[in-house]
Image: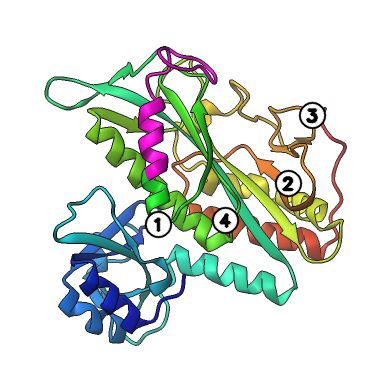
Amino acid sequence: MNYSKDEIKQYVAEEDIKFIRLAFCDLSGRQKNISIHPDELDRAFTYGIAFDASAIPGFGDEVHSDLFLRPDTATLSLLPWRPDRGRVARMFCGITRPDGTPFEADTRQLLRKAVADAEKMGVTFAFGTEMEFYLFQRDEAGEPTRIPYDRAGYMDIAPEDKGENVRREICLTLEQMGIRPESSHHEEGPGQNEVDFRYSDPLSAADNAVTFLTVVKTIAARNGLYADFSPRPLEGRPGSGFHINMSVQGGAEALMHRAMGGILDKITDMTLFLNPTEQSYSRLGAHKAPKYISWSSNNRSQLIRVPAASGEYRRFELRSPDCTANPYLAFALLIYAGLDGVRAASSLPAPAD
């Protein structure tokens, strides 16, 4: 919801909010923040809040290191796990240089520009995500172990599935923040879980993905557990993916296939950003994670899968990314690759059914 600056200040006063976290992401997609007091909101809205960019990997060195956070009022959300007295809220921010020009490495701004470029072509994208993670026990000192929280399997139920109450708490917390989970279940690996999200506009979907990582890690820690989003934390067990569902609208029925063609054409180069860690590649090619540049409407293990759906739910699913990817950068790259396919009227190879 778009709030005015005055509405934000009124809400902060009425809800006894004492800290506002100005959130942003580094190049890898890891969330960072600065907390300010309500008295600083006017300064934040007018001038931005300065921070030392040289301390953020990829943001520059000590020369010209001052950057500014400028809050996006549409992203205001309470953090439900913080105390009711002296509450804490969060807003995602744009990053600018001192003269107000956008910072080149602000991946949220890159995604915003990709959306605008798509709109200029009359094309609209929507994204829904499926995010997998493992829950591990902690030792007596509170440090993470590699002992799974349970030994349940795909879509098992309690008592074998010990994670159902944790997933319930995660989903309820997300709903309190205005984020709508679509479904959740136990995955194939021991202690492995998945939460899926209904499609939304690209910027909201990326914001929600970043928020989801924080919520899951926070709720897991409150339950004495460790949430692991790495691509393959257990050797010989299923890896965890960040499956990205995309829909394309713009008048022509063939748009979706053309966008898919563009993504297949550019996927080799994009994989550096969709799977940015060495461990990412131990996941690919095993336990239904894709290995080849292919697509199918039947075979679930292919790079792109077209689920059986129609109408507003018609979409395609890219199965290669994992949660070490920066969602803003991933979505921006997919939009530009899709637009390239639309321009070129790309055709699809034969499906790998």
Q: Which residue is mark 2?
A: 264
Residue 44 shows in this picture = yes
Label located before the other in sequence (3 or 2): 2
Residue at the spot x=42%, y=49% of the render? Answer: 175
Label located before the other in sequence (2 or 4): 2
Going by the numbered disc 1, the residue's amino acid type is Leu
The magenta stretch spans residue 139? no
Of discs 3 and 2, which sits in the foreground?
3
Q: In the structure shown, which secondary structural element does the residue marked by tag 1 occupy?
A: loop
Of discs 2 and 4, which sits in the foreground?
4
Residue at the spot x=19%, y=60% of the render? Answer: 87
Residue at the spot x=61%, y=28% of the render? Answer: 289
Q: Quadrant of residue 324?
A: top left
Q: In the structure shown, which secondary structural element does the residue marked by tag 3 occupy?
A: loop
Q: Which residue is mark 3?
A: 298
Separation of marks 4 and 1 at Cα, in angstroms: 14 Å
Q: Which residues are magenta?
A: 151-172
Of discs 4 and 1, which sits in the foreground?
4
Q: Which residue is mark 1?
A: 27
Separation of marks 3 and 2 at Cα, in angstroms: 17 Å
Mark 4 and mark 3 residues within 8 Å of each other at the beta carbon: no
Residue at the spot x=27%, y=67% of the render? Answer: 53
Going by the numbered disc 4, the residue's amino acid type is Phe
Label located before the other in sequence (1 or 2): 1
